[in-house]
Amino acid sequence: MIPVLLAASLSSLLLAQAHGAKPSPSLTPTPIPVPVMVSPTDALGTDLKAWFDATKAQDKDAAGKALISLQRKRAERNLVSLDEVAGAMAGQAESKASAGAKAEAAEAFKVAITFAPDSALYQVRKAEAEGEVGEAWSALNLARANPLESGRLDATYYLGLLVIAGLFAIGFSLAVLIRYAAVFSHDVSEGLSGPLKALSLFMAVLFLALPLAGFMGWGYLPFWWITLLFIFESRPEKAVSVVLVIGLALSSLALPRIIQQRAVDGASDAHTLYQVANGGTSSEGEAIVKQRLAADPNNVEWSLLSASLSRRGGRYDEASAFLSGKGASDPRFSHNAAALELNRVNLPGA
């Protein structure tokens, strides 16, 4: 009886404590802040908007002042190209071209080219708006000066030649097969019994279409027929056949170029690195440089490029402090710091 009373008392005590206990606060997961990617060229947005408003109102004086301000800030930051600004201006030009204002579109493309001088696309679109076909073709020379575009042009040429040559080879082969079909049927008929000789032509075509014929004892026929074809062909046909064989051998040199260009186009960082290496800037480019510099902090080239990107992004104090801090390790840092200070004197905005 006593154990039962003790068990009942203990149960009542536990229930009372559970009833009076305060519920534990629920642990809500703290949301992870998503970093906002700020473009290094965001500070140019005010002047760019002023240019848009001026061109929309057809105010040439205001548009000219906005362009002068953009070019001044571009010079202060030592930027060779501004792809984001050029892309926005090119979009404005496309809108004007679609509305039928060809002259205004050509002028807008001309302004966009000044901010992206190595873009062959804007050159072509400007020539199209002006109706100048010759200038569009001359833009190919500009594209060939761009390592990314030159490889794409070569790959396009090679692929086009291979497609045309392949279609011609298929047509020529079918024509020769139809013309000399009797030779094939004769060879097949020699290996058939009397009742099946009427099917020799059909079986010849079937053997050409089915690789299974090679396992039925007829595998030698395609090679023998190629020899017979060359013997029975006329001189022009033999010449074409030789050219096609040589072209097939040369195609093995073109295919690696096409495959390599496909890999380059598939590389996500190719355009970003080219832009950074040729006087441009972007958020992605700065992220890549910071990642490489974090892996090798003593690398002089990446350090100089990081300081240059800070200047291109308008962060002059950051660039000056970074260069001054490393001035004792390499004279190039002190030289770049001195050049930056000189620009501060000549360009008050810097």
Image (cartoon, rainbow, N blue to C red):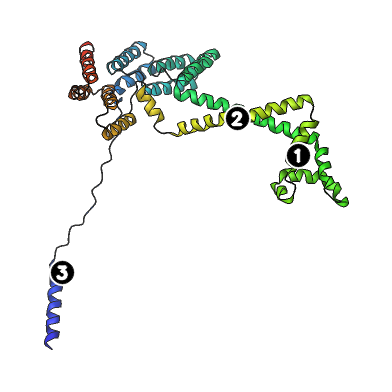
Q: Give, as a three-letter code, the residue at label 3.
A: Ala
Mark 1 and mark 2: Cα distance apart in space = 25 Å
Task: Look at mark 1 in the image and give the residue it sits on.
Answer: 224
Q: Give, as a three-letter code, the residue at label 1.
A: Trp
Q: Is residue 220 left or right of residue 333?
A: right
**Residue 205 in view, yes or no:** yes
In the rendered image, the vertical position of residue 20 relative to residue 12, given as above or below? above
Mark 3 and mark 1: Cα distance apart in space = 95 Å
Discs 3, 1 touching: Cβ within 8 Å:
no
Residues 6 and 226: in front is 226
In the rendered image, the vertical position of residue 77 relative to residue 155, given as above or below? above
Mark 2 and mark 3: Cα distance apart in space = 83 Å
Task: Look at mark 3 in the image and give the residue it sits on.
Answer: 18
Q: Earlier in the sequence, mark 3 or mark 1?
A: 3
Question: Residue lying furthest right in this view?
Answer: 194
Quarter assignment of residue 72:
top left
Query: Residue sitting at 42 percent across and 24 percent down?
Result: 91
Task: Look at mark 2 in the image and give the residue it sits on.
Answer: 251
Quarter assignment of residue 137:
top right
Mark 2 or mark 3, whichever is nearer to me: 2
